[in-house]
Amino acid sequence: MSTGLSSQVRWHEQQVTTQMRSELMRQKGACIWFTGLSGSGKSTLANALDYELHRAGKRTYLLDGDNFRHGLCRDLGMNESDRVENIRRAGEVAKLMVDAGLVVICAFISPYQRDRDRVRALFGPSQFLEVYVSTPLAQCEHRDPKGLYNKARRGLINGFTGIDSPYEIPTTAEFIVDTSVEPLQDSVRRLLGHSEQLVS
């Protein structure tokens, strides 16, 4: 990707600061990043957390990996370079929304540690929470809600994470949950405790 023009662009300072927006919204902006295999339960957990935070009066927005590819990233494929770009865009969008004072919940497979590290680096230490949904591959494959594992095993999909493309287990996740052993309501309750400390 060319950086010729971007290297000539200067950052324009704004009078309304992130702190001013947070004070108006009576919350701190934050990014809660869910990562894990397809079928691990990322979207279900993220959606449930989004709902509970909304019920608690927090201003939130959910960025889901599948939905993201219908719009901003519909021009990207599934090869490694496109996956890297997909996560880069997601991180930059999340950063803008956090700067606006929102609690942004992101659910992306995001299989590579380096990409998750780059996203984390966009935020301050009190603005980012990484949630590793550690549900084992066998359980994800058993669920196979979209039939993708079946297609990957039959050779109809190439480069599928967990089958013939790697998933790098997070080394810095603040929160780990295995949806094959912990009920959804218990996971959400634990997540709420972590999240409310982050955004209050």
Image (cartoon, rainbow, N blue to C red):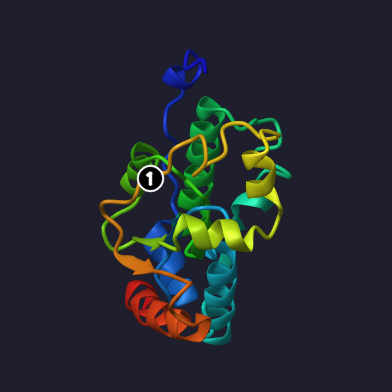
Q: Residue 122: percent from the left, percent from the top? A: 36, 46
In the image, 43: left or right of 181? right
Residue 67 vs residue 111, the one in the foreground: 111
Residue at image coords 38%, 45%:
116
Q: Judge whether 13 appears above or below 138 on screen.
A: above
Position in image of residue 124 (x %, y %): 29, 55
Question: Residue 158 is drawn in which quadrant?
Answer: top right
Task: Say which residue appears at 34% left-offset and 51% top-offset.
Answer: 123
For the C terminus, the quadrant is bottom left
Residue 100 in picture, x, y percent from top left: 50, 59
Quadrant for residue 52, please give it.
bottom right
Farthest residue to the front: give it.
154
Q: Residues within 10 Å of mark 1 (few under 14, many from 20)?
A: many
Vertical relation: 98 (above or below) 157:
below
Residue under the image location 48 percent in, 43 percent down:
92
Q: Position of residue 189 (x, y in %)?
A: 43, 85
Residue 129 visible at all:
yes
Q: Secondary structure at mark 1?
A: helix
Question: Mark 1 = which residue?
Answer: 116
| Residue nearer the viewer, 18 or 143 | 143
Residue 72 in view in this figure = no
